[in-house]
Amino acid sequence: MKTTHEVGIVGYGAYVPRPRIGARVIAAAWGKDEAGRLPVREKSVPSLDEDTITMAIEAARGAVARAGVDPGRIRAVWVGTESKPYAVKPSSTVVAEALGATPWVSAADLEFACKAGSEAMQVACAFVGSGMAEYAMGIGMDAAQSKPGDHLEFTAAAGGAAFLFGPATEALARVEASQSYVTDTPDFFRRQHLHYPEHGNRFTGEPAYFLHSRAATGGLLQALGRKASDYRWAVFHQPNPKFVRKIAAEFGFSEEQIAPGAVVDRIGNTYSGASLLGLAAILDVARAGERIFFCSYGSGAGSDSFSFVATPRLEEVREAAASVDDYLTRRHEIGDYGRYLRMSGKIRLL
Amino acid sequence: MREVSIIGIGQTAVAEHWDRSIRDLAVEAVGEARRDAGVERVDALYAGNMLSGELAGQENLATLIADAAGLLPVEAMKIEAACASGGAALRAAYLAVASGAHDYVLAVGVEKMTDLLTDGVTAALATAADADYEAGHGIPFVALNALLMRRYMHEHKVRHEEFAPFSINSHRNAAQNPRAMYRQEISAEDFARSPLVSDPINILDSAGICDGAAALLLAPSSEARRARRPPVRLAASACTTDTVGLAERRDPLVWQAVADSARLAYAQAKIGPKDIDLFEVHDAFSIVSVLSLEACGFADRGSALKLAAEGRIAREGDIPICTLGGLKGRGHPVGASGAYQAVEVVLQLRGEAGGLQIKGARTGMAQSVGGSGSVAITHILQV
């Protein structure tokens, strides 16, 4: 898919909360004897006063700071998440208000499991690309949900990133093209009135994550007549360190190409935020002229792929906000499972 | 009774067939068995299956398969004997042909387990145990086997890691079977590090949840030369039972039903354990292999682990077991496993087992066990 007007990312910002809980602490709480088999070392957890809205605001402010754009000119704010603080009431209005983008703005929350963030990017890109908006913000942010005791609890983390789309002439990374690939595949879901999502064990792999990531990646590469070696960097959705390596290797992307964007290794899976946070981490290191391949995945299921080219502006504005590495480096360990339960709102009094 | 031969075999790959139905799997195996035999005629179809009602929402299964395979209006019935359902369907087909009631009879074992999450499958599998005295108290099937394994370790003063050679052997063979689910070899270290399922049983002690179907076409030996493929004679078929509940057994480490069915089968075939060139044992858990080898006379009580440690169960050994991967390596689509075992013995006796071929194999035994040793169905096949 290509826009009629040339579009690019004019600003980006990331956010990861400071608290961390070690996978070993979770394993010990549940009596799981899985030493050496834990998918990640630790994951990020929101602080007591943080949720998807506050984290989205932090990331969006970083994007505006790098863009150097008057927030009043932002015509749309979309928040992709599966952990809305309100079941009914938009998160995006709070974010837009906090940014100073209200009231002449489009806003909505998008839900598509872990693909909601990249869907927000697609829509923002289309708004600018069609001439409907000068600037539009797409955010992917989650305080990821997982059932206590479930295997996903080791990785379900908090964080995400925001991307402000605008004219390609102002871009720090130009959008070359994008793709979306969606089927009805129920690999992971949460029904109304349930607290935690269900997942189909190994079904979440081949017929879900891999099939859709493969289609969106292969489709876009083919449409552009490109291969992995035409890119300097690549980022994929990253539910765990293993999946992202497997899909990258299938297309011939090397460990070096994906390493900076594989933030899952350090803080776990931030669901709607995961691939966007990876893209932000790559923008933190990319240089002018380098190509970046992006592919998200969301259960249900679908993938969005994007092809970007970094511009000289990227290196000029990079320091205007905190880097992903800054957020990954600042951390404090919670150290005990009880505190983690309290902080992540998992203790419910009847 | 007429002499009976297997004239055609078919099997689907064992896998997590998320995009296929129980009907679809059964029809593929049946079609392959009919093409293999090159014989059009089918007089009856017996479908071995344990959990189609629980897991696929489908009973009246054999008629469904007969219809989908274009076999109406042949006689068709589902045969259920818990995890031994596949062996039970083969026995039903054998009896139908041997008695003269029918000439060409299909036995198909099929199970579709992956439409439910693990909790649902675990609950369904527990229906093989005694609902009033075992499952009803919350003890899943794996836990019953864990009790047996713990008791065995206690009584014979053996360590858990001594069971590793069984899983290693199954995986080693499965690695070369294109229809197997787990096509990777494992090491003793992998076994030691494998996560616990039900103490002391770990993941690598246990056959996995999966889907598959296997089918065999039987005919009187006198008619067998009409088939395209060399026939394999069913020299023995025997089914015996024991209490469903473990607590009612005088000695839970003596698998009497397994011993009885093997003894009857040996007598029918006029052979003994020494004459068996390969044994497809019901290795749903490694402890089951151990208890079965002892009950069938391949090892004295408490000494089956030694058999494995000495490599005698490997395909180069004198009593090769699980030669195409067994339930552990090939996969255990519960009600289909007994049919897979028989299909695999046929491959060995026809000399079609490729790199897994047991050289000079003339006599093979397949044994399908249901519940915790409560029903055992033994077949001896010969060429």
Image: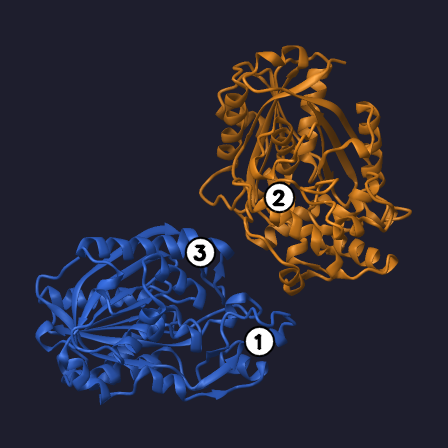
Chain colours: A blue, B orange
Q: Earlier in the sequence, mark 1 or mark 3?
A: 1
User: The N terminus of chain A lies in which quarter of the figure?
Assistant: bottom left
Chain to which the residue tagged by mark 1 belongs = A
Are the numbered discs 2 and 1 placed on the same chain, yes or no? no
Outermost residue toward the right in this view: B250
At 25% from the left and 84% from the top, the residue drawn is A62
Q: Given the image, on which type of amino acid does mark 1 rest?
A: Ile
Which residue is pictured at 62% across the width and 34% down the height? B344
Q: Which residue is mark 1?
A: A26
Label 2 secondary element: loop
In the image, A42: left or right of B162? Answer: left
Q: Any mark on residue A205, and which?
A: 3
The image quarter containing residue A72 is: bottom left
Callout 1 secondary element: helix
Parent chain of label 2? B
Q: Which residue is mark 2?
A: B325
Q: CA distance from mark 3 to mark 2?
A: 24 Å
Characterize the local packing of mark 2: few (<14), some (14-19) or many (20 or more) Cα atoms within 10 angstroms. Answer: many
User: Mark 2 and mark 1: span between their CA atoms?
Assistant: 36 Å
What is the distance, in whole Å, between disc 1 and disc 3 at their CAs?
23 Å
Q: Position of residue B63 (x, y in %)?
A: 56, 25
| Circle 3: residue type | Gly
Seen from the viewer's position, the closer of residues A35 and A200 is A35
- Are discs 3 and 2 both within one chain? no
Question: Mark 2 belongs to which amino acid?
Answer: Gly
Where does the image place residue B238, in percent across and percent down from the top left? Answer: 78, 28
Circle 3 crowding by C-alpha within 10 Å: few under 14, some 14–19, many from 20:
few
Q: Is residue B291 above or below residue A316?
A: above
Does any portion of residue B227 appear in the rendered image? yes
